[in-house]
Every structure is written in structure tokens, then in C-alpha cells.
Amino acid sequence: MASNLLDDNIEDILRTVLEDTDETLLVVNPSVTAIEELIDVAREVSDLPEIRLLGDESMLKDVMSDFILASNAADLIEEDALTLKLLEDENENSLLISSQRVVALVNVGDTVAGLTTDDADFVDVAYDAYTTTWEEASAFNLRTPPLSRVRSTLSEDIGEGVEDDFTGVLGSLQTARGDGDGLDEVTISLLVAAKNEVLLYDISKWGEDVGIASKATFSRTKTRLEDMGLIDTEKVPIDVGRPRLRLKFGDERLYEANTDQLASVAQNLLN
């Protein structure tokens, strides 16, 4: 069975396979890096095949805890370009399988190589076997809303300026997990709301409606940011009921920061 080295860069391997696959691509037991690169590359390929990803549940949960990656994955899911399912056997090889070829992803240190074969008999056996595995696998439930929906509803419900700031802050981040490596999506939403002096009620209602987090989560995060001096509030009387709270920055350094600097300034203040 003849095989050859497809490439030695995971991004280029994935791009080549996606662009050369006509209908369905099975992605079996990918690494964290492979999933991250797959989502990024898939956003750039114009004519995508149907991507069926079989991954370990705990690994998928960890990867999808990054709002940036998960919301982009959700966009692909909504476009019917991506489906996520759970792989029961953690000892499976990392494979890319189409009806034309099988690519084994081999990690050697920091290098990833794609060993590929287009032997028809072997490809047919592998494709049929993993298609059966796919059909029998349980779905992975991604609860993160699509980024396109987040942005459009934020613009419509809160304001275009807020959406511009939200997109700008996300663009300045590599990850949005809230674990020290980046701000989470609720914190980012509250910060851009404070920058634009939006009511807490409005931003938290939007966040709950679009599926980012509950109003209670927004309220708890607001309290934490307020206790740490990043956010301040002022009461706004309404005709009926308790006054509502307008969000404002609580630190002058946040007022002085450009949108692309806002995340790093806030992260420094949180640390």
C-alpha cells in the first residue's frame, strides 16, 4: 500500500484535504490543535464538504470552552457544514477520511505530518467502517450560539457601536475562556456595555436571549467586576418598578484604552 507525506503543517494539511474533498470528510480523534486549526481553516474555505467530527467528550468540552472557537464552530454547524459526535474509543488514531483517501495525522514533537494513501480498497474499508461508527455515535451538544447571531442581535437589540466594540475586543484576543488566558464572553459583553453606558438590564436580557448566559450570570459577573473597580453603575429611574442600573467604567485606564486595547487593560486590572 503506497503512502506519502502530505505536508508537515497541520493548517496546510487540513486546507489541502478540505479543498480536495467533494462531499463528506470524517475527522476522527483530532487533537486540540487539530480542532482549533480545523475551525479556523474551515471558515476560509469557500466550498466546504460536510465535516463529521468524532472526538473525545472531555477534550471537546475543553476546546469548546473557548467562546471564540465555539461560536465559530456553531456558525459552521448552523450552516450544516459541521457536525460533532462523541468517540467512545480513546485509542483511535487521528485520521482524516474521505471517499478518495485516508490521511493519518502523526505527531512527532512539535511537528505534525500527514501520511496519506489513496489505495481504493483500503480507503473504501476505512470510509465504510468509520461511517458506521459515526452513525452509531452520540451527538455532542454545543450550547454556544453562532457568532454571526451574537453579532447581529447585539447590533439590533443594543446598538451598532456596541457590536463594533464587541467584535473589536474579540479580534484582539487569541482565546476567550476567562481562565487567565482571556476574558470570557460575559465579561467582554459587560465591558463593551460599560464603554457605551448601556443598562445592565438590556445587556443581560440580550445575553440570555441569544444564549450566552443567564441574567443571573451577568449579574454575578457585574458584581465581581464592580468589586474589583472595573465597572461602576448609576441608577436610572423608570416609570414603574425599581430603578435600573447604567453600566460605566470604574477605572480611568479603561476610558483611555482603544477598543483593541480594552481586553489587555481589563486583564491587567483583573490580575
Image (cartoon, rainbow, N blue to C red):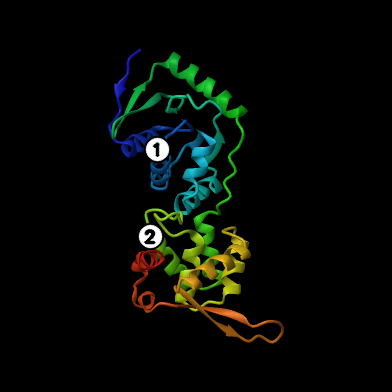
Residue 263 in the image: state x and y as whole percent.
38, 65
Which residue sits at x=35%, y=76%?
253
Discs 1, 2 touching: Cβ within 8 Å: no
Residue 82 in the image: state x and y as whole percent.
51, 41
Residue pointed to by mark 2: 171
Label 1 or label 2, whichever comes before in sequence order: 1
Q: Is residue 204 left or right of residue 118?
A: right
Other-residue count near label 2 (Cα within 10 Å), few / some / many at <14 / 14–19 / ≥20: some
Which residue sits at x=47%, y=37%?
49
Q: Is residue 268 left or right of residue 236?
A: left
SS under mark 1: helix
Q: Amino acid at mark 1?
A: Ala
Measure the C-alpha gap from mark 1 to mark 2. 21 Å
SS under mark 2: helix
Relative to 41, residue 168 above or below:
below
Q: Amino acid at mark 2?
A: Gly
- Near-viewer residue (191 or 25): 191
Determine the image quadrant of residue 209.
bottom right
Quadrant the C terminus occupies? bottom left
- Near-viewer residue (56 or 101): 56
Quadrant the N terminus occupies? top left
Which residue sits at x=53%, y=60%?
150
Residue pointed to by mark 1: 34
Relative to 117, residue 195 above or below:
below
Residue 25 in the image: state x and y as whole percent.
47, 32
